[in-house]
Amino acid sequence: MQFISSRMQIVRKNISLKGSLMRLKLITNNLMILCVVVFFTGFVSKTSAGDCTVKFEDRQQRMSGFGGSTAWAGGLADNLITGLFSPTEGCGLTLVRMRIAPNGTTGSGEINIAKKAQALGASIWAAPWSPPANWKDNNNVNKGGSLLPAHYQDWADRLVSYVKNLQTQGVDLKWISAQNEPNWTADYESCRYTPEQLATFVGDYLGPSLEKAGLKTGIIAPEVINWGSLKPFGDAILNSPNAVKYCDVIASHSYGDEPTSSRGFPYNLVREKGKELWETEYGFDQFAGNETMTPGIAIAKQMHGQIVNGPVSAYHTWWIIPADGVNGTASNGLVMRGKVIQRGYVMGNYSRFVRPGSYRVTANEKPSDKVYVTAYRNDSLGQLTIVAINENTSATEQKFVLDGISVPTVTPWETSDAVKLTARSPVTAGTSFSWTLPAKSVVSFVGLYTTGTSVIPDGCARYSPVNVDCRNALLRIELRDQGEKKTSLKIFDLKGETVKSVSFTTGKGNGEFRNFDLSSLPGGFYIVKLGIADRNISTSKIFVAK
């Protein structure tokens, strides 16, 4: 955690189209949705120096999201929550990191933010800064100190109770951190562990306690202060049979350094053990009052570098809300003077389109001078996303060559000093396209490579949007063995408002099909509920892509 601004920064011969047509039939309870999915493969275009080649079949890490912390936050107005977390109207942030107080609670302001962000598709997790004073060897929640071994189980039990209590309040905690910055002594809440001590706490106490309680909450560790200090802690956890069983995410903060080859990155042991690598905190202290793209480019380059070199699956800024509040001008926030600022929308260039479950694919990471590119595929949405950063102070034309995929068009979404995450006119693509990147900008190019409707069955463990083809724009259901029964289909937006409601009575036969036209719906996420005889029989999450 960076609490005060004075803290030191320890800081790729054209080939004819080959396609395959596949008809999928997926049944969820009594709901059947039919789909047609077309996969295009075998495309290669000629390249020249300076082109950016996206290798669609060369998958890298799975992406889990982008977000920030609400630690000590007193709340956030609904319009700002929409601006930050909505995947259709805002930045589409997907991760919220809350603070766990020593007494095992989180403030009501943070919880209210979490509940509303969760309703917009974000995943919530939390981190403790210190156990209670009397469970530590310095009898103080501040100034470091260590958790006494005699209280390891007490602290694990309190954290389990914390997860359960959040559930009663409507917050589903996806992950819990073992400790914020276990290698940093601070004047504020802090607690130190050695690598071996933290591996023991995770593997012998916290993990088994969560498992015994029947909780699905994963563990994040070690959240050290910087990348240079990660490996001793990460290795201890990954090489411990008990700790590695329970720890899902190996995480680091970014104060003073980056995950470079000189520091031993990429961190191959993380992937070998089937875990994810996350960046979970960094605050830019040098941009107080600055709403421009100068800090926007800085955060974009950091995100790019860590995604490529870590390679991280998630990135978090420090405070979402600055230290001096939503109307303040402190530098480490995505909100300033009462509005979401450029750096927030820069994060949105990633988070709104690189949804959890996407995979990064290989692309020329620096195809031109001061131009940085990453690319992602999301097979659930049938969506290709290319994020390009132009650090130059002048506009720069960039060509993109798509290897192994073809998309009819891409839509550029621009964040610059002139606009905030704004859609420009679609660009004809196919297997290549060019676009002029504005000066000091971040642009996301978004295109669809599948057609049809796909469905994720009810009860999936994680938030998995469903792609609905708006070129056909039909949601098809099959009602089986129902007889004559009153049936309803309701579609809700993520604010809970009904956008479509249809009632009908099923026929006497053993089954029938019904088609529902979704072409009038704006693009975005929706919840579909099918009810029969006043009983809800299916709830599905869908994504309408236009």
Image (spheres, rainbow, N blue to C red):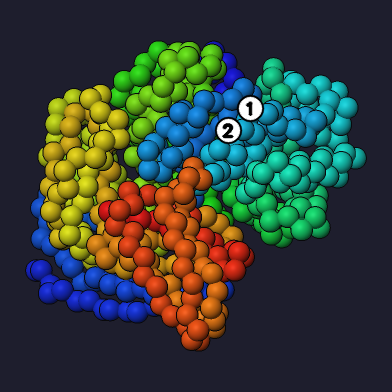
At mark 1, the secondary structure is helix
Q: Is residue 487 above or below residue 91?
A: below
Q: Is residue 499 left or right of residue 510?
A: left
Given residues 84 and 437, the one toward you in this image is 84
**Marks 2 & 1, CB-CB < 8 Å contact:** yes
Q: Label 1 crowding class (10 Å Cα cut-off): few <14, some 14-19, many 20+?
A: some
Q: Which picture quadrant has residue 302?
A: top left
Residue labelled with disc 1: 109
Given residues 34 and 246, the one toward you in this image is 34
**Mark sitting on residue 113:** 2
Q: Amino acid at mark 2?
A: Ile
Q: List x then y, in percent, for residue 429.
A: 15, 55
Q: Is residue 17 visible?
A: yes
Given residues 173 and 231, the one toward you in this image is 173
Q: Label 2 crowding class (10 Å Cα cut-off): few <14, some 14-19, many 20+?
A: many
- The residue located at (24%, 71%) in the rendering is 41
At mark 2, the secondary structure is helix
- The residue located at (70%, 31%) in the rendering is 106
